[in-house]
Image: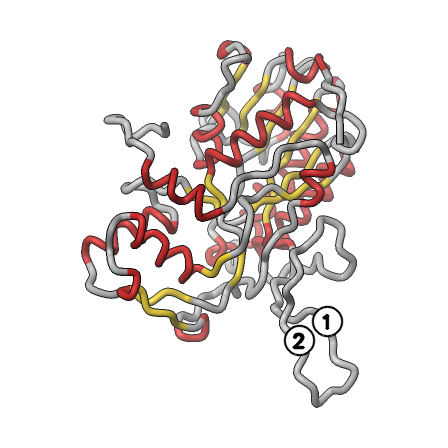
Amino acid sequence: MVVMQNTSASTGSVYLIGAAGQLGRALIARIPDTREPARVRPLTSADIDITDATSVAVALAGLTADDVVINTAAYTDVDAAETDRAAAYRVNADGPAHLARATAAVGAWLIHISTDYVFSGSALGGTSERPDEEPEPRTTPYEPDESGAVVPATVYGASKLAGERAALAADGRTTVVRTAWVYTGGPDSRDFVGTMRRLEQTRETVSVVDDQLGSPTYALDLADGLWELVSIGPVRGIAGATLHATNGGRATWCDVARAVFIEVGADADRVHPCTTAEFPRPAPRPAFSVLSGASWADAGLTPLPEWSAALHRAIAAPVAADGSLP
């Protein structure tokens, strides 16, 4: 599919909300050579409080119709959200609404990052005709607007879904990009891949859940995809759309852990599979949350690489002395 590039979207300023977070830092690390660094404006929580409409108005006072706002800020503590519902909704629902009102007021374009947790996460692909039959496990990746599937099972997921809807209601040109299982993978990173790298050094064996299937996504690949999205602009099929962007393929957490061990030259058999039930958490984890990349490709965007190849690059990537991303 050929999509005409929107020149105003590619030449205006890009405001990165949540610049100190994992994806925000990846976006900064992957600023394209074709974009003037001075036109990329990173905003951290010290610069903007998205839960406060006044703070948003002040921080985005210079926003114009040529500009893009990428919102990566979120309340992401899935377990804490179960008992801190108000805080989760302030950041994940009220925040995007404030940003969307600001972009709508001047005609700027909001790209809002969301999550696989907006789906039910059930491994069941439907209901059985007979109550005594066990429904078949789901195997088909989620499409953005799949009927009946957008039913969050957690406060985190519900607050993120509320944020999607609030942003689109306030600014119909908003583009929602859902992603999943994002990591940078550095040896000191707090994400799953970084944790597995450290555990390989300190434990003889590790037990990792093998009954949750999802879409592992390398933050730098996602950042590259988002910059490509910015370069195309809010054209038909992108403005007002919900897209899925993850690395290709699917894996369980156990699959990812074993791949990490192999990449660092360790024995993958040291990773032992276990069930989610063996590690109960306050918030339920999706049993199946693989996202389809069809919407991304249909919008004229380059599919993100396959997850295992991305993991290889993540672990092979050099780490700067200051800990910055490559």
Figure check: 16 above or below 150: above
Give the secondary structure at mark 2: loop
Q: Position of residue 180 (x, y in %)?
A: 54, 48
Question: Residue 136 — which label?
Answer: 2
Figure check: 305 above or below 139: above
Q: Quadrant of residue 253?
A: bottom left
Side of 206 relative to 101 (left or right):
left
Badge 1: few (under 14), some or many (20 or more) residues near its Cα, within 10 Å? Answer: few
Figure check: 68 above or below 140: above
Q: Which of 43/279 is in front?
A: 279
Q: Position of residue 52 (x, y in %)?
A: 59, 32
Q: Position of residue 174 (x, y in %)?
A: 72, 32
Q: Position of residue 138 (x, y in %)?
A: 64, 67
Side of 107 relative to 264 (left or right):
right
Q: Quadrant of residue 316?
A: top left
Q: Which residue is rendered at x = 70% and y = 24% of the image?
A: 109
Give the secondary structure at mark 1: loop
Side of 20 relative to 68 (left or right):
left
Amino acid identity at mark 2: Glu
Q: Which of 79/265 is in front?
A: 265
Q: Which residue is rendered at x = 62% and y = 25% of the image?
A: 69
Side of 52 relative to 38 (left or right):
right
Verify CB contact (< 8 Å) between mark 1 and mark 2. yes
Question: Residue 126 — which label?
Answer: 1
Looking at the rendered structure, the number of numbered marks drawn on it comes to 2
Question: Residue 296 — which label?
Answer: none
Amino acid identity at mark 1: Gly
Q: Quadrant of the C terminus?
A: top left
